[in-house]
């Protein structure tokens, strides 16, 4: 096994069991509710997913902050001091400034410890899209790939991770500047559900809209049927924000219609959920390219 440390951040939406299995470090990320700051860890130790989304459904409007550069500096310094190189897989730079901050910290630490290498990869993905890159990094490390070989592979791999997202609550998209207020009000009244895709730059791109959740679910499943590249041992991820039963139904449809043997369900944490609200349902998988 190659000797370097792999780390990522809480937007990967890993469970505690998966974090332990992979042996990676996950940086917590901060969100604020009613002026109180909470850190989201994989085990949701400071606020459970259920409590968070219950508050969001009641009308609370959380905000998020980026990971402090100091966190990166301290972690990178600790690893470098112990003779370890570092691979950091970051949340999309189009959605957060965390990657930029990590690069600045990495450069400073590498100057302090000549010979040490710290690679910060902009995943240009979200949730289990980011997580897929982390899992691949662990797989490559165990197979003996070097830090640079792994980072280079992930930089190409990110362009093949497909995200198709159905969003239920338009007010959160409006608050984040994704759609105009008038569109949010009219869309809510008409039961309009936006369909979002993540592009090559890692941006959330509203690409279509449908009336009603059933049509929305059918839409993203149709996209998966057309775009998923079925390969042995390939996984399709169903991710959601507080709509577990719908996620189970979607997973059953994926198994049946895509003939996919490995379908896994994960809940999206508060950092992404703060900007989408409850009711998000998405399919994530590997494809040939992100081109729509």
Image: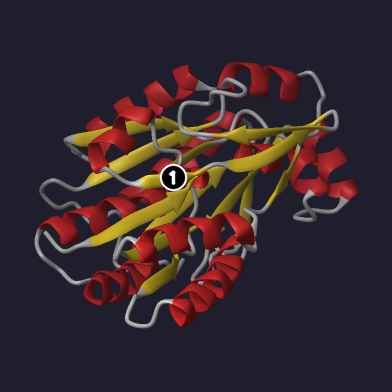
Residue 77, position in %: x, y? 46, 63
Look at 29% across and 34% down and name the residue there. Answer: 20
Q: Is residue 222 left or right of residue 256?
A: right
Quadrant in the picture for residue 104:
bottom right
15 relative to 58, above or below:
below
Residue 205: x %, y % from top left:
62, 60
Image quadrant containing the N terminus: bottom left
User: Which is nearer the eye, 84 or 56?
Assistant: 84
- Kindly indicate the quadrant of the structure image that contains residue 76: bottom left
Seen in the image, is 249 located left or right of residue 197?
left
Q: Nearer the viewer, residue 115 or 160?
A: 115
Residue 173's x, y, as percent? 74, 46
Q: Tell me if residue 205 can be seen.
A: no
Image point (17%, 54%), residue name: 139
Note whether 276 is above or below 244 in the view shown. Answer: below
> Up-down: is 66 above or below 145?
above
Residue linked to disc 1: 26
Q: Residue placed at 42% from the left, 58% from the top?
A: 78
The reply to whether residue 60 is visible in this rendering is yes
Q: How is the image coloured?
A: secondary structure
Q: Position of residue 50 (x, y in %)?
A: 59, 17
């Amino acid at each position: 096994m190659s000797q370097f440390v792999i780390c990522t951040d809480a937007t990967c939406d890993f469970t505690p069991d998966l974090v332990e299995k992979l042996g990676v470090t996950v940086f917590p990320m901060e969100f604020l509710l009613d002026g109180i700051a909470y850190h989201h860890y994989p085990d949701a130790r400071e606020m459970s997913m259920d409590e968070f989304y219950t508050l969001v459904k009641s009308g609370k409007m959380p905000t998020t902050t980026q990971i402090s550069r100091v966190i990166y500096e301290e972690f990178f310094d600790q690893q470098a001091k112990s003779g370890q190189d570092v691979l950091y897989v970051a949340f999309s730079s189009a959605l957060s400034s965390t990657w930029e901050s990590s690069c600045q910290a990495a450069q400073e630490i590498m100057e302090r410890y000549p010979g040490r290498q710290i690679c910060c990869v902009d995943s240009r993905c979200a949730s289990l899209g980011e997580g897929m890159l982390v899992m691949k990094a662990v797989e490559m490390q165990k197979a003996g790939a070097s830090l640079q070989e792994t980072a280079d592979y992930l930089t190409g791999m990110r362009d093949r991770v497909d995200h198709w997202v159905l969003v239920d609550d338009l007010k959160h998209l409006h608050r984040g500047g994704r759609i105009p207020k008038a569109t949010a009000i009219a869309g809510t009244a008409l039961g309009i559900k936006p369909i979002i895709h993540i592009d090559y730059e890692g941006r959330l791109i509203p690409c279509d809209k449908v009336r009603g959740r059933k049509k929305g679910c059918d839409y993203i499943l149709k996209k998966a049927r057309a775009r998923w590249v079925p390969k042995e041992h390939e996984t399709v991820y169903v991710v959601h924000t507080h709509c577990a039963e719908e996620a189970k139904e979607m997973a059953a449809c994926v198994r049946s219609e895509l003939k996919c043997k490995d379908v896994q369900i994960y809940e999206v944490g508060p950092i992404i959920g703060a900007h989408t609200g409850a009711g998000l349902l998405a399919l994530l998988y590997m494809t040939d390219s992100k081109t729509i």
